[in-house]
Image (tube, helix red, strand yellow):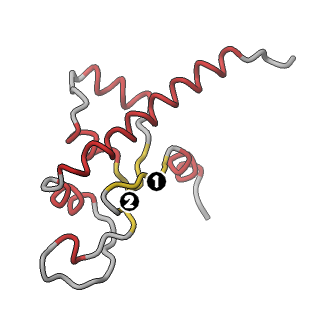
Amino acid sequence: MQSLIDKIRKARQQTVEAGGFKFTIERPTDMQVIDLQQDNVRLRQSELLKRFIVGWEGVKETDIIPGGVGVEVEFDNDLFIEWIADKPNLWTPITDAITLSYQDHIKALGESEKKPVAG
């Protein structure tokens, strides 16, 4: 059974396709964005990739190393970072999706404030 924490995190996730692969991104929370701003961490692509990718689908060992076997590899953040470092063609579509997910979140918050409260 999923905990409430898992359900909250799952609700912030979506899948993005890039380079024939599917990646699970997790929208940054408001607190994470504020912390990054306070730490003066510019939201570089590498920072977004390190912090907000939580899964993948369809990535095989042969995609990661030459001569690997054709089995899907379970997601591991350290492995993902090592692999993606040499895949610049994947950076922009993934990081754009992360940025857009946060922008959509902010937009939705603004729209919910405009709705009248039933009383």
Residue 58 percent across, percent down from the top left: 37, 70
**Which quarter of the rendered picture does the C terminus lie within?**
top right
Q: Which mark is residue 55?
A: 2
Q: Which mark is residue 15?
A: 1
Q: Count numbered badges in the picture.
A: 2
Q: Quadrant of residue 108?
A: top right
Position of 80 relative to 74 (above/below): above
Instruction: Say what amino acid the circle numbered 2 marks.
Output: Gly
Compare marks 2 and 1 and give the one earlier in the sequence.
Answer: 1
Q: Nearer the viewer, residue 111 or 32?
A: 111
| Side of 98 where 10 appears, left or right | right
Q: At 20% from the left edge and 42% from the top edge, which residue is drawn?
A: 46
* Label 2: few (<14), some (14–19) or many (≥20) C-alpha neighbours in 10 Å: some
Q: Nearer the viewer, residue 114 or 86?
A: 86
Residue 20 percent across, percent down from the top left: 34, 63
Q: Quadrant of residue 112?
A: top right
| Side of 95 where 39 appears, left or right | left
Q: At 49% from the left edge and 50% from the top edge, which residue is drawn?
A: 14
Q: At 13% from the left edge and 83% from the top edge, which residue is drawn?
A: 67
Instruction: Say what amino acid the circle numbered 1 marks.
Output: Thr
**Which quarter of the rendered picture does the N terminus lie within?**
bottom right
